[in-house]
Amino acid sequence: MNQRITRQAASRTAVGEDVRPRASLLTLYRYMLASRRVDELERELVASREGFFHVAGAGHEATAVFHFALEDQDWLHLHYRDKALMLARGIPPAMFFHALIGNAESHSMGRQMSAHMSDPARRILSLVGPVGNNALQAVGVAAEVRDEPERPVVLCAVGDGTSQQGEFLEAIAEAVRSRLPVLFLIEDNAYSISTLTTGKTFHDLPNGPADSFYGLPIHRFDGRYPAGCLEPTTALTQRVRDSREPALAVFNTERLTNHTNADDQRIYRSESEVARAAAEGDPIPN
């Protein structure tokens, strides 16, 4: 179910209707649903003490839309909630459980945090613990691949809290100065662990959302409604590929669970807020 199958195998109906968007949305839904099921099984393993640390992707599954714009030669520095996108890229579901348990079959042979996936063969770079540091790494990769004939892009995904880290701001500045093909993706669920970020970031100022940063227009997508994200995210990624210059996007999501299994969001979120997020912002039923 890779992007080549989705793009090439989908055909037109007898009356000329293009069925490719429908095929893509069905494939997207399958990856999103698989990611949610992986989350559920991981929680069961933690509850049975076979695993010890869990980070859910629930609410962020729609970032898998970028799978349809990315190509084999592209590099990914991902957010730890991007399970659906990792599944779409080709990481097998079993690898998430190997990583959770920390056994010899895991991608790092148990040496990396369970949520910090990597897959060199699929050009998924190791997720970092010091958040924001992946942005500097992404810029370094982009500097190396900028002039390659296959025109690869580098996707760098972070959370809204991480977007305020100095490393991330430095990375944007260097990508703009050196004209590097990096797509910076900020997954904004309005929380930096337990702290609300609304009105406290460069992309969401006290007087409202910002239009640009470092000269880059800020493109906005509502990840709570995945069907509307497929075409514009593909177009933006293609623009980075063609121009060999950076782009900046904010992908609004809901965080549907605790930050990790070591967190209790009931301490800082009301029951009504959590219920509203689940009822209105869950991308899978939407």
Image (tube, grey):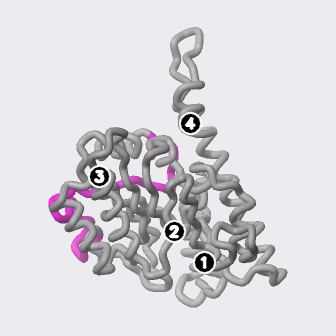
Left or right, residue 128 beside residue 49: left
Determine which residue is flagged by label 4: 24
Left or right, residue 267 beside residue 155: right
Kind of residue sitting beneath label 4? Ser
Residues drawn in magenta = 204-230
Q: Mark 1: few, some, or many residues within 10 Å (few <14, many ≥20)?
A: some
Determine which residue is flagged by label 2: 126
> Does residue 270 show up?
yes
- In three-dimensional space, the C-alpha distance between marks 1 and 4, rounded to whole angstroms, equals 33 Å
Residue 139's quadrant in the figure? Answer: bottom left
Kind of residue sitting beneath label 3? Pro
Q: Can you say whether 246 is above or below 196 in the image?
A: above
Q: Are marks 2 and 4 in contact (CB under 8 Å)?
A: no
Q: Are marks 1 and 2 in contact (CB under 8 Å)?
A: yes
Determine which residue is flagged by label 3: 181
Q: Mark 3: few, some, or many residues within 10 Å (few <14, many ≥20)?
A: many
Determine which residue is flagged by label 1: 112
Q: Can you say whether 112 is above or below 118 in the image?
A: below
- Image coordinates for residue 161, horizontal then vertical, percent: 39, 77
Q: Are marks 1 and 4 in contact (CB under 8 Å)?
A: no
Task: Looking at the picture, tell me which residue is in the foreground, 54 or 207.
Answer: 54
Task: Looking at the picture, tell me which residue is in the foreground, 236 or 174.
Answer: 174
Left or right, residue 15 beside residue 185: right
